[in-house]
Image (cartoon, rainbow, N blue to C red):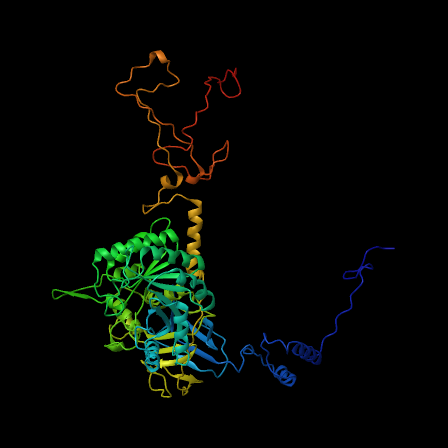
């Protein structure tokens, strides 16, 4: 009997599996109906056709549901053809907005059909402006509900979608009571843009310090403004003393708040009737800034110096920020200091523009004080002219590029208020607070202005006016190519909540804490040197009066002059940054120094043995 099998024959030990039956279209439809019934109660998934009958028709016709993840009840807006500008990049891309949030950013987006579309060709798409310093509603100014609403509307028309309003607490009052009264007073006001509250203080005492934690945890305040006088003891008409500021900075660091500091001398009577108008000299403001930075260094609290009047104060903050360990301090200025100055009939460029270009000034605030200004909001630097003033001062002349412009008017302010990246950035998940800006204003001075302003995906302003049903001004909103009339915008702003310890600021502060624990010795204001961190030892200098161990006492030369004794160097401790293990040297720690000194120079060297024999003993090989 032959054991050879024919080609292709199945061995007898292999059991063939039954072939699966070919499923019919009816079974496929039945399975999909079952899955639809299982997912009908899951609101996190977006279903396609609503009924099984529509699914059968679609499967029979061969249609694919590419837009089944888009729900018809949501509000969409598609912006095409624009150039998106963030604080770190620029790119040509389209935007898809869903319910006030940016859903997608890209060139080829899968969008639902029949949705409103804006053609943003030849336009820059930037995040909405954030004004980090305003003083609109305070007891020192007459408050009127209509004036307050009109001031906020002017901010929106100028491209600002978020205001950080400072509520100043008068002397002898508690900040919680003042803040609650201001919130109740503006509860029924029309908010055309978002509002973030901050508390400003003119004095520091135990009762006020006890309310800091209450303001942060229950009233959503994560920043405080301190008016500093720069003296140890102050009169009642001046601001906070240095001793009171130190207590306030330590408290802010403990609860995770941000401290803003403003010099009383810079807060003149033209901006506030609280202080006297005796403006100090440049030297006095520089000295006050230096003392303030020293307190910030001790407390390791993030500090923002607001609206300095001369560049010397900015230079002081730069010096402290670049020392090791660094002092976390930033500077804000007003648009007015960016203008050219006129001296003896000659025009000179602003001294603040180089600091703005180098990033030493992180944001530009309007410092809008009250609503009943004598010159109104038409003055340069007001809340409605902030973006235009910064653009005209820096971008056409080349001091700023569009990304730097976004940084100083929006992104950096969002970082220091804890709103980034929901505010101050265009990315998926961010709020659709946008400003459309003409791209030809990059080189043509006098043409920079907001073309369109969007708040949570709704068109609010066009060409400096509220958007109405007219389609003759600004970009068109089209649906399948046909213009669509827009509804009259309504106030849709809200009061934003801020959290303590924003990681956009406190991540660097916590890193500095680790650096200080690693190197307890303060490095001061000098540059980084390994001598300071490793504790370089001075070499031993022998004198004529000392007797070494290798010389006998009888042959020693007589000392000339008084005999001096060289003190024995002390043992290096671990506080110098060199980790020593008993009996070993830590080779991972750097001990390099230009003088050649080592940490164990004070220890006796091991005695060596000289020998003429090679390793392994004497060699008798005649070949070598």
Coordinates of residue 86 in the picture (x, y in percent): 38, 67
Task: Count numbered badges in the picture.
Answer: 0
Q: Does residue 565 show up? A: yes
In the depicted view, which residue is nearer to us: 563 or 335?
A: 563
User: Is residue 35 rendered to the left or right of residue 275?
Assistant: right
At 23% from the left edge and 70% from the top edge, which residue is drawn? 270
In the depicted view, which residue is nearer to us: 483 or 146?
A: 146
Q: Does residue 91 show up? A: no
Coordinates of residue 268 in the picture (x, y in percent): 24, 66
Coordinates of residue 492 in the picture (x, y in percent): 42, 79
Q: Residue lying furthest left in this view?
A: 344
At 47% from the left edge and 79% from the top edge, which residue is drawn? 76
Q: Quadrant of the N terminus?
A: bottom right
Coordinates of residue 282 in the picture (x, y in percent): 21, 57
From this view, report whether residue 58 is shown above or below residue 515.
Answer: below
Q: Quadrant of residue 287?
A: bottom left
User: Is residue 41 rendered to the left or right of residue 433?
Assistant: right
At 36% from the left edge and 39% from the top edge, which residue is drawn? 531
From this view, report whether residue 37 is shown above or below residue 517.
Answer: below
From this view, report whether residue 131 is shown above or below residue 293.
Answer: below
Q: Residue lying furthest top in this view?
A: 554
Q: Quadrant of residue 340?
A: bottom left
Q: Quadrant of residue 175?
A: bottom left
At 40% from the left edge and 31% from the top edge, which residue is drawn? 570
């Amino acid at each position: 009997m032959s054991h050879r099998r024919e080609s292709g024959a199945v061995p007898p030990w292999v059991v063939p599996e039954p072939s699966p039956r070919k499923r019919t279209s009816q079974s496929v439809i039945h399975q999909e109906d079952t899955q639809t019934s299982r997912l009908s109660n899951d609101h996190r998934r977006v279903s396609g056709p609503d009924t099984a009958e529509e699914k059968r028709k679609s499967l029979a016709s061969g249609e694919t549901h590419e837009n089944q993840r888009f729900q018809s009840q949501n509000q969409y807006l598609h912006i095409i053809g624009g150039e998106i500008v963030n604080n770190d990049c620029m790119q040509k891309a389209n935007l898809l907005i869903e319910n006030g949030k940016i859903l997608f950013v890209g060139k080829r987006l899968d969008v639902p059909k029949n949705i409103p579309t804006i053609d943003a060709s030849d336009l820059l798409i930037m995040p909405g402006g954030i004004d980090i310093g305003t003083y609109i509603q305070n007891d020192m100014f007459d408050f009127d509900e209509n004036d307050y609403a009109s001031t906020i509307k002017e901010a929106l028309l100028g491209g600002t979608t978020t205001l950080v309003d400072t509520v100043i607490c008068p002397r002898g009052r508690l900040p919680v009571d003042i803040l609650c009264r201001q919130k109740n007073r503006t509860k029924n006001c029309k908010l055309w843009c978002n509002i973030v509250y901050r508390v400003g203080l003119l004095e520091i005492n135990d009762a006020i310090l006890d309310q800091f934690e209450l303001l942060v945890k229950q009233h959503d305040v994560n920043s405080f403004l301190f008016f500093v006088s720069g003296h140890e003891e102050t009169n009642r008409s001046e601001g906070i003393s240095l001793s009171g500021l130190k207590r306030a900075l330590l408290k802010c660091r403990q609860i995770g708040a941000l401290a803003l500091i403003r010099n009383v001398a810079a807060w003149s009577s033209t901006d506030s009737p609280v202080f006297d108008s005796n403006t100090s000299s440049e030297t006095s403001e520089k000295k006050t800034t230096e003392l303030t930075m020293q307190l910030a260094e001790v407390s390791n609290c993030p500090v923002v110096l607001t609206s300095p009047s001369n560049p010397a104060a900015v230079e002081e903050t730069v010096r402290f920020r670049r020392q090791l360990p660094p002092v976390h301090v930033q500077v804000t200025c007003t648009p007015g200091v960016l203008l050219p100055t006129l001296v003896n009939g000659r025009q000179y460029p602003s001294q603040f523009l180089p600091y703005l270009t180098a990033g030493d000034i992180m944001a530009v605030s309007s410092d809008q004080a009250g609503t009943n200004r004598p010159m109104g909001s038409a003055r340069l630097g007001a809340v409605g002219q902030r973006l235009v003033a910064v653009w005209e001062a820096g971008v056409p002349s080349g001091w700023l590029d569009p990304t730097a412009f976004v940084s100083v008017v929006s992104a950096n302010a969002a970082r220091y208020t804890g709103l980034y990246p929901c505010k101050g950035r265009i990315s998926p998940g961010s709020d659709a607070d946008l400003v459309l800006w003409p791209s030809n204003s990059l080189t043509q001075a006098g043409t920079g202005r907001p073309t369109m302003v969007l708040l949570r995906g709704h068109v609010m302003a066009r060409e400096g006016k509220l958007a109405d049903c007219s389609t003759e001004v600004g970009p068109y909103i089209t649906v399948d190519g046909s213009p669509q009339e827009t509804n009259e915008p309504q106030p849709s702003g809200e009061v934003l909540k801020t959290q303590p310890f924003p990681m956009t600021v406190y991540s660097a502060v916590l890193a500095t804490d680790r650096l200080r624990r690693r190197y307890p010795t303060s490095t001061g204001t000098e540059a980084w040197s390994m001598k300071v961190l490793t504790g370089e030892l001075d070499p031993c200098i022998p004198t004529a009066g000392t007797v070494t161990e290798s010389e006998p006492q009888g042959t020693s030369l007589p000392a000339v002059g008084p005999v001096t004794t060289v003190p024995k160097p002390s043992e290096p401790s671990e506080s110098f940054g060199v980790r020593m293990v008993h009996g070993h040297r830590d080779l991972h720690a750097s001990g390099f120094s230009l003088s050649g000194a080592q940490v164990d120079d004070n220890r006796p060297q091991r005695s060596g043995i000289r020998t003429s024999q090679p390793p392994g003993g004497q060699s008798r090989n005649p070949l070598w």
